[in-house]
Amino acid sequence: LDSTSRIMDPNIVGSEHYDVARGVQKILQDYKSLQ
């Protein structure tokens, strides 16, 4: 069971939370790439 994909499923968490979570992931990735 891939819990990450289930948590990130917009049908389960709701599209608003999904967008926020994706935005946070992108920020974290950008931050890591700057280090």
Image: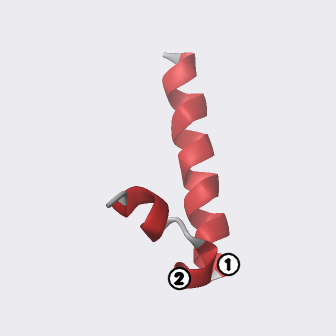
**11 versus 35 height, above or below:** below
Residue 14 in percent (x, y) is at 60, 83
Amino acid, disc 1: Ser
How many numbered marks, from 0 up? 2
33 versus 5 height, above or below: above
- Tell me where residue 34 appears, x and y as whole percent: 56, 18
Query: Pointer 2: residues within 10 angstroms few (<14), some, or many (20+)?
Result: few
Residue at mark 2 to residue at mark 1: CA–CA distance: 9 Å
For residue 18, which quarter of the picture? Answer: bottom right
Secondary structure, mark 2, is helix
Residue shown at the point (62%, 75%) measured from the top left: 10
Q: Which residue lies furthest to the front in this view?
A: 1
Residue in the image at 37% along x and 57% along y = 2
Residue sitting nearer the eye, 5 or 32: 5
Residue identifier under label 2: 12
**As displayed, is residue 11 above or below residue 7?**
below
Residue displayed at 54% across by 47% down: 25
Measured from the top left, where is residue 7 in percent x and y? 44, 69
Using the image as rendered, state which of residue 2 and residue 22 is in the foreground. Answer: 2
Residue 15 badge: 1
Under mark 2, the amino acid is Ile
Q: Residue at x 61, y 56 (%)?
A: 22
Quarter containing the N terminus: bottom left
